[in-house]
Image (cartoon, rainbow, N blue to C red):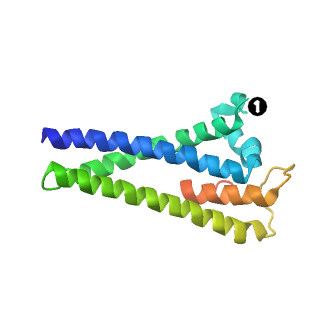
Amino acid sequence: MAKKIGILILVIFLSIILASIYGFLHNQVSYSISTEYFTKFKFDQFWSVKYTLDFPRMSAGLIGIASTWWFGLILGLIIGIVGMFQWNPKVMWKSSIGAIIRTLVIAIGIGIVGILIGKFIISNLNTNWNLPVDLMDQKSFLIAGTMHNFSYRFSRTDLWN
């Protein structure tokens, strides 16, 4: 049982680390798609506003970490607790790592789907969304926003309301 508890703690830690890395890299991709998504929207939502002038890309990455680490905690707890029901620590470790990898692949896939839907559908719609007034590249802003909506809150779209 002690080995399983050790694996549980390791799974939680690993999930937090991977979720944080995912959030950092996710925001690097979306920052590359639209810097305005951050400078005219995301930075206002997060604490990093004062850092955006000197290190905007790093601030985008830190926002990604702040947005995802806690999900890694929850996911790690769930995967680790379910893993505790496995026959032995070796099977627990293997099944838990498999679940983490599958979850990460699904999250990346959903982000890619968000980019594609943003690029080919959302950015081509002519609707009256609540967007910043002085956008230079509305299409890129919408692509980055769609990527975020798919990745972080697929069922909730606070940007479009």
**Relative depth, front residue between 8 and 152:** 8
* Whole-percent x, y for residue 125 in the image: 77, 70
Residue 140 appears in the rendering: yes
In the image, residue 8 above or below residue 138? above
Q: Is residue 29 left or right of residue 20?
A: right
Name the spot of residue 106 as percent of width and height, x first: 46, 62
- Which residue is drawn at the image coordinates 29% and 40% (left, top)? 10
Q: Quadrant of residue 17?
A: top left
Q: Amino acid at mark 1?
A: Leu
The answer to whether any part of residue 154 appears in the image is: no
Per the image, label 1 sits on a secondary structure element best described as: loop
Work out which quarter of the rendered image holds the N terminus and state it: top left
What is the number of callouts on the image?
A: 1
Left or right of residue 115: residue 125: right
Horizontal side, residue 109 vs residue 27: left or right: left
Dot 1 surroundings within 10 Å: few (below 14), some, or many (20 or more)? few
The residue wearing badge 1 is 53
Residue 143 locus on image (x, y percent): 70, 60
Residue 58 location (% of width, % of height):
64, 36
Left or right relative to 26: residue 45: right
Q: Residue at x 42, y 45 (%)?
A: 72
Q: Residue at x 71, y 28 (%)?
A: 50
Vertical comparison of 2 with 117: above or below? above
Task: Tell me where residue 101 sits by quadrant.
Answer: bottom left
On the rendered image, what quadrant is the C terminus found in?
A: bottom right
Residue lying at 68% horizontally and 65% vertically, measured from the top left:
118
